[in-house]
Image: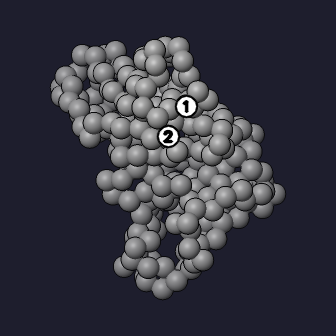
Amino acid sequence: DTGVSQDPRHKITKRGQNVTFRCDPISEHNRLYWYRQTLGQGPEFLTYFQNEAQLEKSRLLSDRFSAERPKGSFSTLEIQRTEQGDSAMYLCASSLSQDRAYTFGSGTRLTVV
Amino acid sequence: DAKTTQPNSMESNEEEPVHLPCNHSTISGTDYIHWYRQLPSQGPEYVIHGLTSNVNNRMASLAIAEDRKSSTLILHRATLRDAAVYYCILRFPSNDYKLSFGAGTTVTVRA
């Protein structure tokens, strides 16, 4: 068990560019969650999956954001046409089932310049 | 949705106990009380959870009031590595037990 891995750890991009982040959950976990965290705030829920099915998307997830979890394994979060307001830490978590503890990754810090 | 209220910050001396309060006056019978903490530059990590009875694990203890409208996370002997933001969160079946974070309590430990 190597925990939840996120890649990259840091990303600097120019406004208007597209970015994609990857999350590798703990292998036996069927739930996968994405959160966003800005400085001084708690993490905000974005979306989550059970296996490959995306169960819910927060209203924070505009149409520029898309997440996938093909085959119920790793997940990607893509942001198109990035804006400065997208600068944040993007956190991924997984859990064995809906009521079990989450294990978080260390996050991807995005800076849009 | 049930919500929690925590102090913004608390300070402690190393090797002394820390008692972190959390109010959840609108809690319902099926809501679990969870605590996570977030160390600097890391993702949150699970600390402890409970429903009605007090709970202990290797990291902390959780004391739940009899009416369940408040709880206290107890770190028995704070170390410098316990400096973090501590989040008290209610998890409940109607939102599929998702974690919803507030601002948490920032704990500072003095050497």
B86 sits to left or right of B93: left
A31 sits to left or right of B46: right
- Give x and y (percent) for residue A91: 52, 54
Relative to the observer, which residue lies in front, B19 or B28? B28
Cβ–Cβ under 8 Å for marks 1 and 2: yes
- Give x and y (percent) for residue B29: 58, 27
Q: Which residue is mark 2?
A: B2
User: How many tags in the picture?
Assistant: 2
Residue at the far right: name it: A71
Q: Which residue is mark 1?
A: B28
Q: Quadrant of the N terminus of chain A?
A: top right
Residue at the far bottom: name it: A16
Can residue B34 be seen by looking at this rendering?
A: no
Mark 2 closeness class: few <14, some 14–19, many ≥20 residues within 10 Å? few
> What residue do we see at 63% from left, 46% from top?
B95
Q: Quadrant of the C terminus of chain A?
A: bottom left
Element under disc 2: loop
